[in-house]
Image: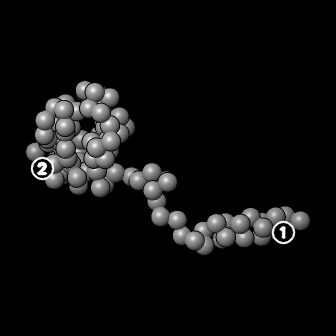
Amino acid sequence: MTMTQKAALPLSADEEITLRRVAYGQSEVTSLRAQDLLRLRDLKLIEGSAREPILTADGKRCFDALPRAATQMPVKPGDDMLAGLARMLDRQARK
């Protein structure tokens, strides 16, 4: 199964969380969902021992393609200022 075929089988939200946790290596394997680990292994997204799973090359590509959390997204310095200006102009227009 190639990465393109795997992409046709989207991961569940829980499987995405498990993939992220494996990628970051910050969670004890006993706290990860066993069924997610089995599926990620079946999809060849993780490998390694049962106690220390790691991402495969396909797993890394899949992880890199996952949406990033809002707190991880780059913030442009002017965004807050522009949003504030837009609110101010909207209030002025309503008067």
Q: Does the image show residue 12?
A: no
Dot 2 falls on a residue whose secondary structure is loop
The residue type indicated by label 1 comes to: Gln
Q: How is the image coloured?
A: one colour
Q: Which quadrant of the view contains residue 20?
A: top left
Q: Report x, y in % for residue 74.
A: 47, 64
Q: Tell me the residue at 19%/37% (across/down).
A: 52
What is the secondary structure assignment of the residue under circle 1?
A: helix
Q: Residue at x 25, y 51 (%)?
A: 62
The numbered dot on residue 92 is: 1
In this rendering, position of residue 91 left or right of residue 58: right
Question: Is residue 35 in view?
Answer: yes
58 or 3, which lies in front?
58
The quarter of the picture where the C terminus appears is bottom right
**What whole-number distance in Å separates the C-alpha atoms at marks 2 and 1?**
56 Å
Residue at the image point whose x is 14% and y is 41% from the top: 47
Query: Looking at this rendering, what residue extends furthest in the left direction?
Result: 1
- Left or right relative to 94: residue 3: left
- Residue labelled with disc 2: 2
Mark 2: amino acid: Thr
Closer to the camera, 77 or 82?
A: 77
| 10 Å crowding of disc 2: few (<14), some (14-19), many (20+) | few
Residue at left offset 13%, top offset 35%: 49
